[in-house]
Amino acid sequence: MQDGFYKPKYLDKKTGQQRISKVWWSRDPASGKRVSTGARTIEGARAWLEDRERCVNNPLYLASREAELGHWIDRVIAIKVEHSAAGTVNMYRCKLGHVSRIFGKHSPMSVITPTTIDRYIDKRREEGACNNTLVKELACLVQVCKHAKREGQYAGDISALKPIGFSSGYMPRKAHLDQGDLEKLAAVLKPHELSAVTFIVATSARLSEYLRAVRLDVNHRSWLVRLRGSKTALSARVVPVPTPFRDLLLTALPAMETKWARISRDLPRRCAKAGIPRLTPNDLRRTHATWLIEAGVHTALVAKNLGHVDSKMVERVYGHPEALATMGVMEAQIALVEKHKKASKSGSDEASAGAVAE
């Protein structure tokens, strides 16, 4: 016997000889009965006893041992289906799919610990996942733990799950088209490809929104375009097309019904052929935002066109005006303020003169 653990003797029915069990036994703190720990090493047996004692002393931990991870993943996705946009639901399904695959959907909630999170990150990195992806997966998993904890089925410290110093390391792209690059790109595109590029630049459509767009969504009399978005609550929207983009929208209309299905794969190749920097469909969307900001449009209005809740994403990711364009906007605003000051001073002088005359 060692620290309350022992290996019982038993009679081998085949040989009739007495043998010693290879597995350590102990007294179960929950039932008080002598039971097998299932462990062949004394370390494993001690871990078993520690776990059983936690179950006895902490009902919440016991509940987390009985609650399955897969059940709570399904619960969270069901909540997102009811309250969130389709794009958000798809993101949760994708990210939590990796969690379920690696941890196992039938694993208990108690399996989610800082140590297992570290192993999960190592595994996903071996599979090629970047930190930006892992941050999103951990955020979805934290939501699962929060919902389970709220109903008393997760005992872990949620604040300790994220590794210290772990961040996405995400640096937003700044690539976008200028007028010269757009002309070069247009020269190497087929009609339906040019339609895709000009439609996205003119309207700020996401790739999925472009693929859903039909000719009836465009009203070129009022210059309004309906975008059938689903990523967020504001994605389904009507976008005004200001003057600098109207010619592009007219260019997009003739071949609009023929979609460029492989634009994500083919656009970088077309850019290489045109001799311009590599672009993605989202860079075309960034072009729309950048051109508006360079024209002096307020970021709140740009965000509304993009289908964002506020202007934070515009300022961080989408709006990257060139220095000369930024200076032009500043000069225009300074001139406007100076004009307002002169008008105010002139009105004040006239009022003073009138008072003296009286």
Image: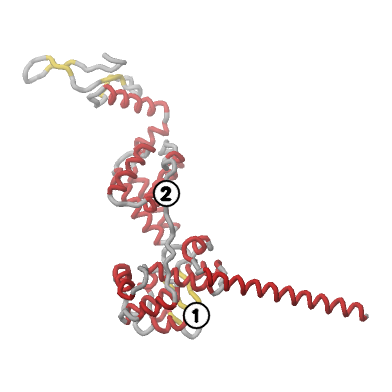
Residue 75 shows up from this direction: no
Q: Could you tell whether 333 is left or right of 234 in the image?
A: right
The quarter of the image holding the C terminus is bottom right
Q: Residue at x 31, y 40 (%)?
A: 107
Q: Is residue 321 above or below residue 126?
A: below
Q: Could you tell whether 302 is left or right of 93 in the image?
A: right
Q: Is residue 290 above or below residue 108?
A: below
Q: Could you tell whether 1 is left or right of 201 in the image?
A: left
1 or 2: mark nearer the eye = 1
Q: Which residue is mark 1?
A: 244
Task: Examine the image and state in which quarter residue 285 appears.
Answer: bottom left
Front-most of 185 and 198? Answer: 185
Secondary structure of residue under mark 2 = helix
Horizontal and vertical percent for residue 315? 52, 62
Q: Which residue is mark 2?
A: 139
As measured in the structure, the alpha-carbon distance from the residue carrying label 1 to the one carrying label 2 is: 40 Å
- Picture colour scheme: secondary structure
Secondary structure of residue under mark 1 = helix
Which residue lies most toward the left here? 15
